[in-house]
Image: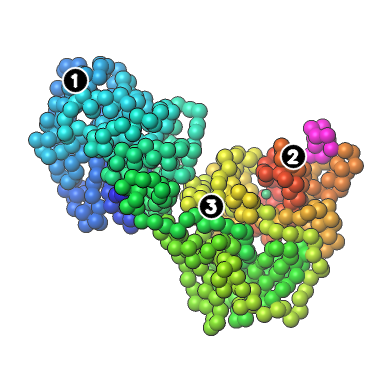
Amino acid sequence: MQTSIATVSLSGGLAEKLEAIAAAGFTGVEIFESDLLSFNGKPRDVARMVASLGLKTVTFQPFRDFEGMPEPQRSRVFARAERKFDLMAELGCDLLMVCSNVSPDSLGGVDRAAADFHELGERAAKRGMRVGFEALAWGRHISDYRDSWEVVRRAGHPAIGLTLDSFHIFARKTDLKAIRSIPRDKIILVQLADAPWLDMDVINWSRHFRCFPGQGDFPLTDFMDAVLTTGYEGILSLEIFNDQFRAGSPRGVAVDGQRSLVYLLDQMRDHASPAAQATPQLPPRSQCLGVEFLEFAVDEHAAAGLHKLFQGLGFRQAGEHKSKAVSHWSQGDINLVLNSDTEGFAHSHQLTHGPSVCAVCLKVANANDTLERAAKLRDTPFRQPVGPGELEIPAVRGLGGSLLYFVDPASNLARLWDIDFVPAKHPAGHGSAGLTAIDHISQSMQYEEMLSWLLFYSALLDVTKTPQLDVIDPGGIVRSQVVQTADGALRIALNASQSQRTLSSRFLSDYSGSGIQHIAFGTDDIVATVKALQANGVKLLSMPENYYDDLEARTDLSAERLDVLRAHNVLYDKDETGEYLQAYTEGFQDRFFFEIVERRGYKGFGAVNAPIRLAAQARLAPPAAA
Ligand code: MG
Ligand code: MG
């Protein structure tokens, strides 16, 4: 199907928007009147620009407060429409979008509205143009697509059709069933927007919180199912009003838009309709079996510090890379890679960000299929030269310029540690501290990036997302959302803050960008692990006495158990499925830190304890620069 996006969805000037839209692979664009008015040039210049980019202007909008007007406004409205048709002729656009009237002057009545549209259809047809009618969720008389359809049906004019916009339909929780009985040739345009379910005024909800399909809560596959059932094969257009998008880069947001449509259509792959059948197939969402390794980029100085910390955490140096200054550390099912090479990707990441996690390697069912799907989703593949006989591990760009590698059990990639590494000559280490696996990874990002990475992970991997959660930091609110596989083999927490003073934000400024802020390792016995860490000299975050007094008051934990938690600075939570115990290391050079968790059937991430942890970290943090 042809894809389009409204200029209003992106930041920047009109030229910049159009370039971003074309570069992201859209074939169509909806030109918003405001973008045209602020453009320093004639509509003809816009037409030339659109054509030279290989785009087509699919509609010009919005045309407001049209139907059902009494005289003398009615005559004025038709005169206004004629002027828009003149402008559209210059713009090279043949579809005018009319949204339902919100004016208090408008008169109701389906037949009156239908008669107005019939006349508008006559005028449009004379110029070879068409008109689409959309029911705004807050229209004065028409706010439901079933009523706008009745108007279009009674108008009975070939130049008049219906525009379906998923936002307006879901915002009023309108039944989708009636879409299926609309003749396909009467649907002139389908606009797609997702949104989180918010209990707020619908106009503000629409103008600030729309997002791309897959980023919100609307059941858009149900909407697509109904639309495709009509046999509709026309344009799918994204019309997204979103504050974060208008603060983001137009190129990045446009790519996200295209990715959202590829992913949405991919979810409709089994639909019997001609449009779904004609959609190119992608390999299925990649099944993630776990995190194969995390790679840390460090300079020599930080390498020494991290060696010490890894040993303190119970890791053993297992191997050394055949051709690079790279070491492999392991414990349980956890693999860490420490890269202090002075060339290549990790080195440049280190120069930009300082000591940091520069790559996450996922173990997936099929690495090549994952890479192919990623490329079709417009993710950015990454390659760098490898030594003779060494593996080329498939990779794409991840958060903050980091990499996401893919290995699988079926190919040579499974033998990564044997092929690229030799056993360490001096396998340093204190012995295991009982860490078994990576429980979760926490990434901090700019608020504007959060929806982007949410879509990135959900479109590529077979994961689900948890509802958004707001966590209280001493410096402000941190928004948190988790993407995870059903079995917990992969859990990634995405955190973003709008305040400059939260730990999450300070991480971003100190780190020069987004990245992994903390890594949680699982253990079967947190107390034994904490004891081992302390014996190895690892500094753990100290928790306030008040926390344990409160825990005593609100749980039925025994005095003995509370004493143990208190003595080892272990935080506690419980849900309907089990218990969760957490402890934290102090930060490594104030860049990242490690969490130790014992998960006993518990499904969450200890959100109730996050403010306690954040406050404890804030007490240790150097004061913010004035
Ligand atoms: Mg719309
Ligand atoms: Mg955590």
Q: Amino acid at mark 3?
A: Asp
- Of the numbered discs 3 and 2, the one sitting upstream in the chain is 3
Residue matched to label 1: 73
Q: Nearer the viewer, residue 305 or 470?
A: 470
Local packing at callout 1 (Cα closer than 10 Å; few below 14, some 14-19, many 20+) is some
Residues in magenta?
546-557
The structure residue drawn at horizontal position 62% and vertical position 59%, both measured from the top left corner, is: 290
Mark identifier at residue 574: 2
The verdict on residue 289 being magenta is no
Q: Which of labels 1 and 3 is toward the front?
A: 3
Mark identifier at residue 462: 3
Would you say the magenta stretch is mainly helix, strand or loop? helix
Q: Amino acid at mark 1?
A: Gln
Q: Amino acid at mark 2?
A: Lys
Q: Nearer the viewer, residue 548 or 128?
A: 128
- Of the numbered discs 1 and 3, the one sitting upstream in the chain is 1
Residue furthest right in the image: 560
